[in-house]
Amino acid sequence: MSRTEAKKPSLCTNDPLTKERISFSLSVLSGIVKSCYGPTGRLKQLHNGMGGYVRTTSQSSALLDGLSITHPVLKVLTASVQNHISRFSDCGLFTAILCCSLVENFQRINFAACTVTKISRHLLSLSTDYLKSEACGCRISVDFDNIKTLLSLVRSILASKPACMLNKTEVNHLSTLVLKAFLLTIPHTIETNVVLGKCVIVPVKDKRVMDSTVFPGLLIEIPEFQLARTFPVKRVSSSTIKMALFCISMSGDLSSIGEGTVIVHHGISLEVAVLDQLLNLGKQLVNDQVGLVVCQKVVHPSLKQYLKEHHVITIDRVGVSMMEPLSKMTGSQPIAALHSVSPTCYGSLKDLCTESFVSKHFLHLIPNDTLVCSLILCNRSEMAWDELKLACQTAEHVLQLTTKQPLALLGGGCTETHLASYIRHKSFTLPTNVLKAIDCSRTQYQLVADAFCRSLECVACCLEHDDGEILTDMVYGHFWSIPSGFPCDCNWSDLALKCGCGIYNNQRNLNWTVLRSQCIPFAPQSCSNEPSIHSTDHLVLDCFTAKCSGLQVAVETANLILDLSYIVEDQN
Amino acid sequence: MASAASLDLGRLVQEAEALASAVRGALGPRGGQVLMTRPTGETLLTRDGRRVLEALNLGSPTARMMVACVSSHHNMTGDGAKTFIILLSKLLRGLQAILDKREGSPFCEDIQRRERDQKHCHSLKQISQSLMTFQTHILDHIMAQDLRKHFLSAFSSWEGEISRDTMESILEAYFCGRIGNSHQKLLSQLSCDFYYRCIPFKNGKNEMLDLVNEYFLELHSAVTGLPVSNSRILEGLVLHRDFAVYCPADGDIRILIVTESIDSALSASGLEFVVNAEVQYQASQVWITKRTEAIMKHLQNNNIKVLLSSVKQQEIVIYYAKISGISIVECLSSEEISLLCKTTGISPFIPTQDNIHSAIAETMIAKFCRPLVLGSKRYVHLGLTRTCAFEPHCVIFCGPVHGVTEQHASAFHGAFKMLQQLFKAVDLSDGCEAQPENPNNTSKAVHCSWQQSATQQKFIMENISCNREKVNDQQLKTSMAETEKQFIDSSRWVDENPSCNQTDLQKSSDLAMPIVELESDFMFSALSDRGSSVRELQKLPLKCKHPSEMWVKNKSEPVVNNHRICNDAMTAIENTSTSVVSKQLNAAKEYWKPGNHIVPFKYEKSYKHTVQSYTNLVIQAGSVLSVGGNFEILLHYYLHSYAKQCQQPKITVISTVIADALLSIPKILYRTTKENSFTQVYFKATSALQTNQQLPMHQQGLESVYCKYQLVASVLHCLTKLLTIDLIIGIKRPPQKIDDPEEDL
């Protein structure tokens, strides 16, 4: 008899957002993400209280993976941020903070959910249209001939991860490496369908960050004893080594026999038959002048021995993840047959050499066309290395996204404050027919718009964690921060040195006000004509695609949460 | 021991109201979302009433039954789960109020002498029967006679084409209820686009809808982490697998489907392979490899570029495919394979010894076949040409979380189910034929059944005085034995109904055989025969516009005059001297002509076409009404006026209860709006109806009448089922499923 258990009835909550439980959990979550934001963000230590691995991080992906969230509303929020991160890698904290503060601010004005939803959707479309239009004053186009912009982009990402424990020179060094590695993955010949190569990150811990390097080609780790015995390599010519790549097991085990039975007469060994085949294959490889054999799985020791005797280097157990870059880099096709191997499947290498780092030994496969490169990433501690790896992957992903849409947004809070002043200005000059289409009054619209802008400014404010004062100028709508402890009789213009993104210095009278104070709406001017964009070395930039999408996801998720009228929790 | 409890209406009311309160917040365009967590911990957002109700994990058997009814209704129409449960709770509440009153209630009067605890159950049974009567007979007629003139047609031409504007407003109204106003516009545009892009030729819509509904899982993909606005329609199919081998190809790409492994194994099931020598083993391995190579070469020679496989192929096959420039997609689901076969009309290829040398005929042609990256997953994007039944397209749903994409996908699927319903029609004659035959209704029976709209009925009642026999109790009892119980109710009603203009011209002795065809739903009157003189109707202004269509059937059965109903006046001509005159104005035989039709269809130019004439249908395919509770208000209004006319107290009570319960839907819809409060809307609507004007429209958007009709019918059916339960018995074991041995036959 089948076991049937009575199901527990589900727990239902009416009007969940008015409940104490949710507002408390939301404020805790928003406190966590807000304090992590930016280059001076506070680090969080994740541990499970039972010993074991402790992770120190300030990055959204590690943070949200580590948090165990039970409240379903918060689950929706974190799931949407995590999904955003899995698509874009960057701007996770931005999305999370914006979403939290949108929920808080919209709840405060206390309108019917559908009114808020309609208006905020309109505000969102205003924002995205502005960001995507030519007239946008807070974005710059990325010129791939000018390495400076790209470098700024990578540097901003690495610098905003305080848990990597990098100083300024280290940030610069790593940014150059990441950019170099990325450029190596771009194919030389551009066809219609550009397929980028791959950058493999090789971990080397217990070394200084400054020892990190980039190699074109692949590094395959080999045991030390093998290192001594590998040379000399058999070459076809001085710059060509023939290579065979196998994706099947060469261990001499029997292939599948099918569903029926196989009867083997006494005295006949199938293993011997297979090994015989393997050695025949080895003979063919030697005759074809193959210098390197790489196998995804295990190679039989007898075959290895045979190949070694004929000066063929054998590397086995490289794993499935290495197959694609290997095949891509060398042009060889993974071979799946043990007999009659077609010579067209062989690939070629330019050279082969060995590299050693600390206690690790690598075989360096140098290809003719560099589509694949290896980034040796060093950091002092294991914890910081994990954080650094994540940061480098984010940077690589951002560079890939930027090739698709060669734009960047101003970082350092300037985009948020600029966009907020643009939206404020727009909401005051909105034509009546638009209001009619949304079916709301002007006051309603302005209240929601104000909540929207305050949420954007709140994200910018989260960059400052040391009680400094945050200002905005009334010309460009940029973000200026003043360190705490300034004398109160001091003039702001003496203290504000540089705006958040680094485009503007304090040269003109920019008419500063405290951010989030009531001020007259103004149309912020664009920065695109500024000569300093291309001359300044140290701009702070954000990924355009990731931030635009993060903005949309945050607003959509906030609307979703506000629209909840009922929760049904399955208790089983 | 098994525990037994009798059905308690109060408990039913409580349960239904608790269920209704769970979904009420999500009803209508201004409703909110419901967030659900699964036992697995994932969260799901929904406004789908069925999902919510099913997630509640209820313990009570009656509540579970209600949820099961909701589910089965929703499965069919793709809509209306929330309305269903709200309506049900209101109906139960209404019935409870009647039973509580007791005094004067038609359901309680003749059982006063019975014991107290039986009494309650008995009246429930009676209510259930009256409901059944109402559902099977009255509802259709009210739909046909009263509501029908308010229906609009979604079709813009006689061929059943549907214009984009109309389609959009239908879909928009649908999505408004299903996902709220945040992304409703986007999704309705998306689904509208999908509809028009998938439809292969003008009249292929039903085939296309069937296919889309059946294979919806294969026709959509979801991407999380992107804004909803990134959702789009792609031309061609997306196979939810990655290429095992990808070799780019241009031009027309020939594609082959295989359902088994190309590489043959050493032995097959039921066969033995004997190894005599090592050389033999090696040779057979070589032979297998050579054979695979030969097959792949053969495919290459036949210019096959892509191999779609339902099973995993051996690495050796992949290796040779790569060499021969053939792309392979493996592990396709059987649904994907059958979708491919259906859209292209080809069958899978099976390599045998014979056909690996002949040319391959069964291939499909694609414009392109390339990898597609959606989110983090890699899929195969296939652009088929030469398809039948359906132009392949697929939908990509984007959203910040999985809950959103799933909600959108299920709403999208529901929309196509709804469209399928929209193109269905209801045939009234089916319902009439299904009525139980009265054994008394033989050749001698005199029967006159009037089936008319309530107002027309009234008109006739006032002007025609029918000669009516008082049927005495004894006669009643004789017929009772043979007829269904509902007839008793109806007969009694005839007896006691004072409002009927009965003239006692004749005494019962004269009567050879009284009435008794009780078209339970409708008034009927018995006309006497022979000597008795039926009063002539000559003084009445008789208008019969189409005498040609008036015809007399004279068989052994009663003479039936089928009249067409004209809207303003209608009447019947009777020859009083004939012995048997029977007049049946059957709504089912009612013929409408566009010219006579007084209801203007003038909202928008595309709706101008009237409901087609010369059909037996209560609801035409493609009938729609504007949204905003219009259907409910209309049905409420006509039920009320019907109840006023109705001579049968039980039906009157039932109709009133149903009419009042219907109003709860617009009440919830208009609960938060300021300009259109419910009372205003209701007042406007009823005053418009009284002056015979078209209903005022408050909102854009149309909804399918068929779905609404189905909803009312399903709710009534569910209610009937609930009320017929006598005892609820708790048992320890799960009930054994009774296997029907003839199931397979």
Image: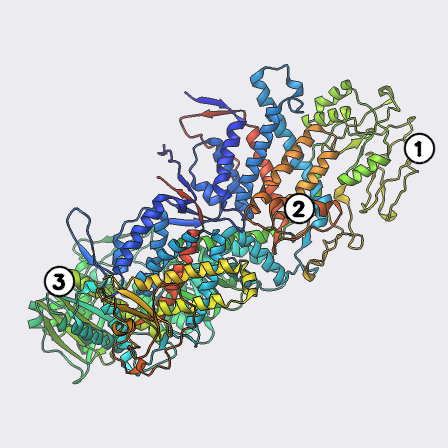
Task: Give the quarter of the image for residue A79.
Answer: bottom left
Are dots 2 and 3 on a single chain? no
SS for callout 3: loop
Quickly name the residue at label 2.
B426
Tag of residue B577: 1
Relative to A178, A91 lies left or right: right
SS for callout 2: strand
Number of other residues with Cα within 10 Å of mark 3, as a class: few under 14, some 14 to 19, many 20 or more:
some
Number of other residues with Cα within 10 Å of mark 1, as a class: few under 14, some 14 to 19, many 20 or more:
some
Whole-Å distance between the Cαs marked 2 and 3?
A: 75 Å
- Which of these two is toward me, B431 or A113? A113
Amino acid at dot 2: Val
Are dots 2 and 1 on a single chain? yes
Residue B485 image position (x, y, % from top left): 68, 25
Quickly name the residue at label 3.
A381
Relative to A570, B158 lies left or right: right
| Residue A328 visible here | no
Q: In the figure, B253 relative to B177: above or below?
A: below
Number of other residues with Cα within 10 Å of mark 2, as a class: few under 14, some 14 to 19, many 20 or more:
some
Task: Give the quarter of the image for residue B136.
Answer: top right
SS for callout 1: loop
